Image (tube, helix red, strand yellow):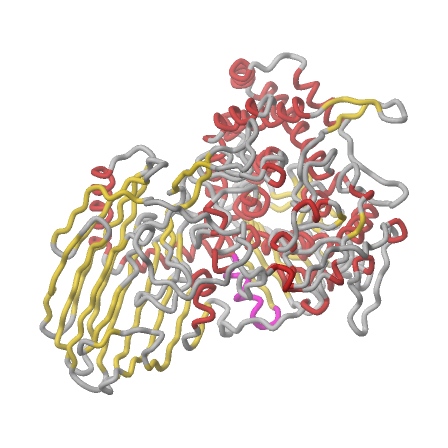
Amino acid sequence: MLDPGDAFPEHRDFGDDPWVLRTHGLQAEHAAVDETLFALGNGYLGLRANHGEGLPLGEHGTFLNGLHETWAIRHAEGAYGFAEQGQTIVNAPDGKTIRIFVDDERLTLTTAELHDVTRSLDLRTGVLSRSLVWLTPSGKRVRIDTRRGVSFTHRHLARIELEITVLNADADVSITSLLLNRQDLVRERPEPAPAGLSDPRRAETMPGRVLLPALSEQEGARSILSYSVANSGMTVAAGADHSFACADRWHRNSADITGDRAKHVFHVHATQGRTIRLTKTLAYHSSVHGGPPELIDRCGQSLDLAARLGEDFWAQQESWLAEFWQRSDVRIDAEAGVQQAVRWNLFQLAQASARADGKGIAAKGVTGSGYGGHYFWDTEIYVLPFLSVTNPRWARNALRFRQLMLPAARKRAAMLNEEGALFPWRTINGEEASAYYAAGTAQYHINADITLAIARYVRATGDAEFLREGAADIVIETARLWMSLGFWEHDRHGEERFHIHGVTGPDEYTTVVNDNLFTNVMARFNLRYAHRVLTEMRGDHPIEAARLCERLGIHDTEPGEWLHAAEGMTIPYSAEAGVHPQDAHFLEREVWDLANTPPEQKPLLLHFHPLVIYRFQVLKQADVVLAMFLQGGEFTPEQKRANFEYYDALTTGDSSLSAAVQSAIATEVGYHELGYRYFEQALRVDLDDRHRNTADGVHVASAGGVWLAIVHGFGGLREDGDRLSFDPKLPAHWSSLTYRMSWRGSEVEVRLETGALIISASPESQPVDGSFRCTVRGEEISLAPGSSRIVPLPDQGQTHGVFAGVSAGMLPREGETGFLGPASASIPLVTTTIPVLDPGDRG
């Protein structure tokens, strides 16, 4: 439910450049969030946007995808099969710190007199820049400019350039460049947060030493530190190399190295107006198997490469991003700020996935430690749809990572007395790391989510070879899990139905239920797709199919059993309420009084015991609505509208995964204004810190959801087998929407205007099916490479006015007409006994 009072919040101003995020001044209250918003990464290496001088500070952060520590989960009351080992991302050695002294006065940003402070992130070049003028206590004006980049072309490298110019006098300038193990050293910190309930969205704090010093090297202007991770056994090495240039006489004053710190000091007597330049190049390597000597050698090789690159480092970065934007940009003629925000979200998808190269895509990418650096279902449902049609190689790499996790998933299924494979709900190393099974392990739907992502990738690319190379094993083993988990029972009409009990759907405010609709709909897809994959392989590639059957021990009747279970799957529906219940007993619960729950007690998960929440009809995020988005063909248009009207009023939006999907379905069923309001909410989840945890890292899935809301929501794109269909609904105040996509070998540009949809196939297209085929509101379209088609649009789809979820207290704003959905009469009375607590009751 979208709170009308929050529908159009005041947005934080980042300037009006559609390609550049910019701030002015130095605001300590924004330090932690800005470290995330301006963070740089490439999918493997991530640098939070900490100021090199230290304070103001939210949290220091340098992260390598997959570099983690493990720890024993201590359950208050253990039980067989509980997750035994937690995993937490490790803060790699920090190379961002560079301290500046002028006439022996240290630049401290929080106390210095600063002028003209500007910080900017250029999305075309991937460069974070900062410029300021420091007026020293002795009256000297010092201009300091920095730029920072994390390479997309060389994933182990990052570079920092610092320029210092004393504007009005000569001065002695010293620069201290550090490489620090901040994971274990005492760190500069702001004042501690007030005591209170811990936030489960944050990473765990390790009590003991994590990084154990190993070998180190220092020669000339180069230093390299290496470590082993105490419990996980991983190794990591970090190196820094320096190049110093100025017209005045200078010298490297000193250098030293210990197990946790490497330091280089440069000193110059600077002449007025002459610029000093320090270039600091960083290299990072981590490994599960390689020892410290090997990683030190790798860092040395990477730093040698960087030295040869010189200024080409920046040129290669800009060239790489130019190609990314050519494939991935979404151009919108809309109100100020929208284009910039859209591009920032797309840039985050590149930073989270481009060079993950054999690793997963974490919920926070490599921008922060939130959620412990874990991989969830977020990747498959929210990120891979974008990657599969814009950057399919990255999507393949992410799915290949799931394939490598299959042996562990088989072991996990066996531990839970099931056949096939059960992928972990949250993980880094492939083992289940969720200590709370009710909202974790019980979300078996992750199996079908992964299979859906495989199906989408194969459909979008025509890369059926990927299935034959091992992805088919995932499809079949996940189908087997459903067969083992589910059971047959006769309903009241004597018909045999397939049930799945004891699971949790996407909505984590309703757990361990029977016949969760989302789970059953997705399991049905999984079973059908497994049957299709094996049938097609037997027809087109009988030898590979025979090997697959032998490898997995597939008996002759098994594929038929998958299809039989899919067709007999229980899909809950209430004729009385006119909606699909979220689970078998969902409609029997009372409705949570959202309208009278004060803002300071949201999100609910931080203020109410789970058992309190579980007793009510209240949703953390879209569940049935998400099922309708992913498997739209399973629902009629009337059912979609009725379901949306019912569940929208019950959805808190406590999850960042919800708004984008609610936007797409609201738009589809005709509530265009509400769809746009949800889009705004998703668009600025991080830019406006809507969930108050952007400081812990970017919400990568929400960034993917922004693309889904635009292309699938306003653009009306849907997948129908191997074809695409379009039913566009351009927001009334937008003039146009343009995006590109790759579909089965065709490179296509889609432009939506108020009165027409223009689809153009690039001359370089090599369509798998001979041409690009789709439908636009039922009209068949076929485009050969180099051709285009203009399809007139007399309107932008049916609209039902403005919907307000009256049942949960969402009242229309002034001038709007509230709509009470057809299911409203059957919604239980809103409870009057919600334990809304006075803040003083918490002591």
The image quadrant that residue 495 belongs to is: top right
Query: Which of these two is toward me, 834 or 563?
Result: 834
Q: Where does the image place residue 739, in percent across and percent down from the top left?
A: 57, 56
Relative to residue 127, is residue 252 drawn left or right?
left
Q: Would residue 517 appear left or right of 388 to someone viewing this image?
A: right
- Main SS, magenta residues: helix
The image shows residue 784 at horizontal and vertical percentages of 59, 45
Vertical placement of residue 161 versus 66, above or below: below
Nearer to me, 268 or 339: 268
User: Which stretch appears magenta?
Assistant: 334-345
Q: Quadrant of residue 89?
A: top left
Task: Report if residue 826 is visible in the image.
Answer: yes
| Residue at screen point 43% across, 44% down | 88
Q: Is residue 179 magenta?
A: no
Residue 339 lies in the magenta stretch: yes
- Residue at 11 percent across and 75 percent down: it is 248
Up-down relation of residue 679 to residue 130 (above or below): above
Q: Position of residue 518 (x, y in %)?
A: 70, 39
Q: Is residue 139 above or below residue 680?
A: below
Q: How far across and down, in percent of the image, does residue 555 sit?
A: 62, 12
Between 100 and 346, the residue placed more toward the observer is 100
